[in-house]
Amino acid sequence: MSADHAPSSGMRLTLNIWRQSGPADAGRMETYHLDGISPDMSFLEMLDVLNVRLEREGREPVAFDHDCREGICGSCGVMIDGNAHGPEAETATCQLHMRSFADGAALTIEPFRAKGFPVLKDLVLDRSAFDRIIAAGGFISANTGCAVDANSTPVAKSDAELSMDAAQCIGCGACVAACPNAAAMLFVGAKIAHLGLLPQGQPERSKRVLAMARQMEAEGFGSCSNYYECEAACPKAISVENIARLNRDYLRAGLTTRD
Amino acid sequence: MSSQSTAPTAAQNATLDSKCPQGPIQDRWDRHRFQTKLVNPANKRRFHVLVVGTGLAGASAAATLAELGYRVSVFCIHESPRRAHSIAAQGGINAAKNYPNDGDSIWRLFYDTIKGGDYRARESNVYRLAQISNHIIDQCVAQGVPFAREYGGLLSNRSFGGAQVSRTFYARGQTGQQLLLGAYQALMRQVGEKKIQLYSRREMLDVVVADGVARGIVCRELGSGKIESFAGDAVLLATGGYGNVFYLSTNAKLSNATAAWRAHRRGAFFANPCFTQIHPTCIPVSGSHQSKLTLMSESLRNDGRVWVPQKRDDDRPPAAIPAAERDYFLERKYPSFGNLVPRDVASRNAKQVCDEGRGVGSSKMSVYLDFGDAIARDGAPKIAEKYGNLFQMYQRITAEDPYHSPMRIYPAVHYTMGGLWVDYNLESTIPGLFVLGEANFSDHGANRLGASALMQGLADGYFVIPATLGSHLAGRKLPPVSTAHPAFAAAEQDVQQRVERLLSINGKRGADDFHRELGLIVWNYCGMARNAKGLDLALGKVGALREEFWHNLRVLGSAQELNQSLERAGRVADFLELAELMIVDARHREESCGGHFREEYQTEDGEARRNDAQFAYAAAWQHTAPGADKGGQPSWSLHKEPLNFEFVSLSQRSYQ
Amino acid sequence: MNNRLFALATSSIGRKALMALTGLGLIGFLVVHLAGNLTLLAGSDGAAFNSYARTIESNPLLPLAEVGLAALFLAHIVLGIRQAAGNREARPVGYRQFQSHGNRKVSTSSMLVTGLIVLVFLVVHISDFRLAARHPQGLAYMVHERMRQPLGAAVYLLGVGALGVHLWHAFQSLFQSLGLRHPRYSPLIDKAGRGLAVLLALGFAVLPVYTWVASPAKAAAKAPAESTSSAVSGPHDSSPAAATPSVTKEPR
């Protein structure tokens, strides 16, 4: 892009971005030059700026998923220079600021890649596989209205905290993206731990883990090689201890359930 | 297809029937449920309910209705129902459990909510909300929401947003996320059991009203651009608020008013649009590139002290300003509530000191929120335990360390109390169209208390709508309907034409550009403080901008693909009309109440002065130019729903 | 029931558990094997070693044990290859750039490679000592002869080194795959696993080193081009190196 659209102050960047017009398109990398970027911009605001300039030039803007822009909805997420959600730890793409990059940097921006996450357009994915895994068993069956008083079942504080640690998962898929095997073990493990650590989750514990793991495989995710890339990429720093819990619950359920 | 009207359209009636039950307020909800016709269990699966939106209200409603046996279809704009913006709520959810034994009760929660809403909410609704609040907590715990707990294993409560009792349940700073995941998981369980059909990446672009009753919706499948119609027996809108009319708000980027606005154009009244909430503890704007604002939980005000320099244009760093030269303006003006005054009061005061030239930061549009005293008192580890994640978030965004220098905050638009008018059954003025959660106007009056939005969304979805839907499904004779009904073809054509219109303007400005300009107009003239002159000016500006929009918009790409520019353009088009109604409403309400502060109507201390004699009503606006869809001039007529206060006596709010 | 067990064993988590269990069995075998090897150091002429070998070989249950051992190896290998192939399928389009942030060491990402090196070594090793005709002077002599040759020793050291690298990751990983992880014990397991990897690798490397140290003259005579000192120092360098991570880039 020509420099005359923007003041020459600010950061200059070269962006190599994956462009793909639709699910059937093979896709390719395209290069854009951008300047006038403030270090205080978020990464997505930098993409906004790029898109405004592309539109002004009559070129199609880069499609990317985003919503809350505060790291909780899990919509955003791209690979930046080979890092899921970029170079900062415990930071979703939307929370990443341009001050994390050097002036003059060349950035490679690719979608999260996995068989289970087909690309719809440019950087936009279909992560509905995660929904189907939850639908298979990632819940506690408690019909509305049948609940007993909230304080009738005490939960040890330490269990509640561990459960919450796992429940923080935002479902962004960075664990899958960063895993060399494109495994969804951390996502599934987090849900197994969240529900399995609570007394309310016990009745369905075995059924849940068997069903979720079966769906996980059916969606085409890989298996765990204990690389722990997922934990490092997770914007919520969810621990691989949850994967061990998934393994344990799964094996126990597989060996001991009667039905 | 029968052409006879199966129900009178309230739209033609001048007075609004809230259908509130009478009698002792404690018995009203019970009595109402008893009087509402039940749908025969065997018949439930014959009824098809369309639920639009999967936030707290939509997801909880869909899950519960499917559990009851209804056939449910769910539509969400996101790729997954779990991404709805309820997920971003931080602080907590109120309930009148009185677990801490500190004097709380259903009655107190009811009273606080009415008072906090500055007496512009319906008593019957609010009492019901307070009653239901306790069941919500039970339900959420049963679903596995990992609320904070004490060492004994029982639930922990905190005081929130100036409440003098500890009634707020929370899950760290991610209460909304955990509640939404609970509702989402309940929803997905029904999807797995094939009782709910889930349609994601669908944006609702119209309500289909057949023979006077809402019988379906028209959506755009965002991946392919395909226009699709769905027919059903009831339509539930749970599509959230319209805070993004300001462009900069704490709402998510996809949050929009299009579904509600399309329903409004089809006959649903829009109530109290000028009641918008500004949240005091947001991270200040850093530059013109800003795409959204980030809220930090107002629990920060429990330990942080708000101040600005006493002198104007004091450029010294905060540490160099001695205590004697600081103005802790909230503590000074409101000695009993101090930094914990309600959101609107805190926000307005922050704006006031900035307007006086005493703001801090490079933009001078922020005030300090200082944890220095709290850290000195409790130690940094204790403060980190309470607010660590918020401090980290702040530091990540601003690159400033709040442990060592005070945070800077500024108010931002956060929530909209106004919305589609609904009666006690949550039914809009279009029969068969129900509105839940933030999308309706019902329970918060002119100002919402902290930790009450989550409560209302879940109350509507889990407990209210499952009980009141029978009034429509069992109480009216609904002929079978399919998308073959001519009303569907007509609505689809409208949608199609609108999309084509947006694409064919071929002007020079992108939708976001218009949106930013609109947001600035609304923020400047219809934001934290309003006056007649400014509102009149704004009305002209918005009209002119809308005119330009329809002649100078530029949308690239086509309608038959994933086209995010096209999506945004449609939403901005609706915001351009909604903004006008907001301004009209703000102009007509010649009083100050809650989030609506008219500078002409304030006490000598600068507090909001209500005018109960003239304005103790909900203003419900009827759109009267249905053909003005594509750029023409909208117009409205006003309907008033009088608010009677039988149980709470009206008083001036005072937090001094 | 049987269907369920089959489903369990063929699921990706089940396969990993089986890999872990077979791996654990193989580690057990290695420990015993090493203990046997070390009897070479006991006597000056390898009598202890030869008698140990004879005792095992005369046990009528040996063929059964060998079949079992082969099954363990086979299962471990097949599962590993199957797993790797499935994982490759899970990402049909790769990244232009990828950066690792996990606790990945060379050992972690090279499990398949080190496993395959060990497999090749295994074939050589078995054909050398198990399938080859027994020399009248006994097994100890055969080991001695093989280790005396630089090539034989190098192959052996390579195999043993790859094994050490493999085990560096394997031990703690098998606990994770079996779901045995706890913040209090896992650091210990990590350390124990690395210790075990080093011990096994060093232990097996002792053989060639001992052979060279015990009879430097013979070794030097066989390789006159090399100086005695280098012949002695060579194995000293390479044996710990094979087992420590700093030099484990080698198998890549």
Image (spheres, coloured by chain):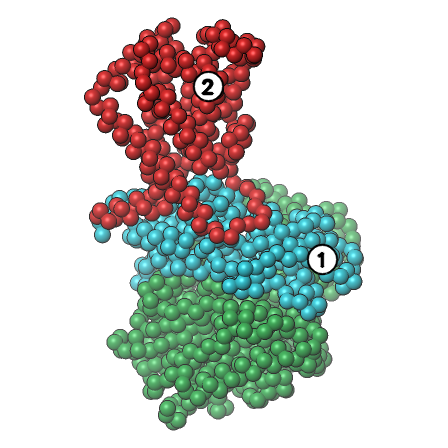
Palette colour of chain A: cyan
Q: Amino acid at mark 2?
A: Ala
Check the image and report above or below for B431 versus A11: below
Q: Is residue A55 visible?
A: yes
Left-right relation of B488 to A89:
left
- Residue matched to label 2: C153
Q: Is residue A117 above or below residue C143?
A: below
Q: Which of the 4 image quarters holds residue C51?
A: top left
Quadrant in the picture for the N terminus of chain A: bottom right
Please identify which colour was used for chain C in the image: red
Q: Residue at x 50, y 75 (%)?
A: B226
Residue B539 in the image, given as x and y percentages of width and height = 68, 81
Please state the horizontal and vertical placement of residue B281, each as a whole percent of the image.
61, 59
What residue do we see at 34% from left, 63% from top? Answer: B192
Secondary structure at numbered mark 2 = helix
Q: Which label was assigned to residue A34?
A: 1
From the rendered image, report the letter of the chain displayed in green.
Answer: B
Whole-percent x, y for residue C145 in the image: 41, 13
